[in-house]
Amino acid sequence: MAAGDEVRASVVDAARALFRARGYVGTTFKGVAAAAGVAPEVVRRYYDNKETLFAAVLQLPVDPASAIPRLLAPGLDGMGERLVKFVLDTLGDPKSRDELIALFQSGAAAGRAAGPLAEFLQESVIDRIVRAVGVPDARLRVALISSYLVGIAATRFILKIEPIASMPEDELIQILAPTVQDWLTPTKPLPGVKFETS
């Protein structure tokens, strides 16, 4: 293994340990650099931001941050379906599964439910989409969508509860997408929630 590859591997290993211990929000480039025994600039040489570093730890097939513009480009119509498909495809990749399970378990052990995974999806993916769409009571909608999709991902890939675990992805998307679409639609108020514009 070349020296640069060894450094990159040590950065990913340090990041993995910190994401499990501190969660996504609590992990910083500075902390990862210190744990890996390198300067923060070295971490930035390999990873542009925390999202790309997290994607490397999870061995995600795509960088979620760069995927957001593609999700948003077609507009609000069909956004629920695109978002559900993106999450299922991203978290369902076989190379990501072991790390996904470990992150879920580390979060559960720390009393944070899905922990780093939920924080990552909320901060890096769903929050950006909701801000771009401009829905009222956005914070609540982000939390609802994140909880819903992380719960489905855990049910399908970690707990393997049937029939969700083996349901064809297209069928599952058709079931889930309308709910997510409603939560993303600015003209659809959340039931029982009064939102006042000022």
Image: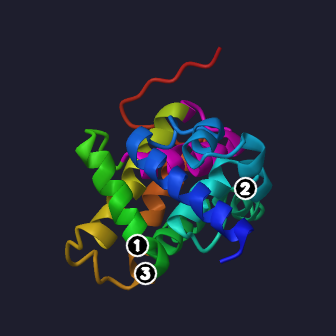
Tell me which label, 3 or 2, sits earlier in the chain: 2
Residue 56 place in picture, x, y as percent: 60, 64
Q: Is residue 116 magenta?
A: yes
Q: Nearer the viewer, residue 2 or 91?
A: 2
Residue on which the image places disc 2 = 47
Name the residue rendered at 71%, 74% in the picture: 2
The crowding category of the residue bearing disc 2, from other C-alpha atoms within 10 Å (few below 14, some 14 to 19, many at least 20), is some
Location of residue 159 with respect to 168 vertically, above or below: above
- Looking at the image, which residue is at 51% across and 24% down? 195
Quadrant the C terminus occupies: top right
* Residue holding disc 1: 97
Mark 3, other Cα within 10 Å: few <14 / some 14–19 / many ≥20: some
The magenta region covers 115-138
Amino acid on which disc 2 is placed: Tyr
What secondary structure is found at the residue carrying circle 1? helix
Q: In x, y percent, where is residue 121? A: 52, 51
Amino acid carrying label 3: it is: Glu
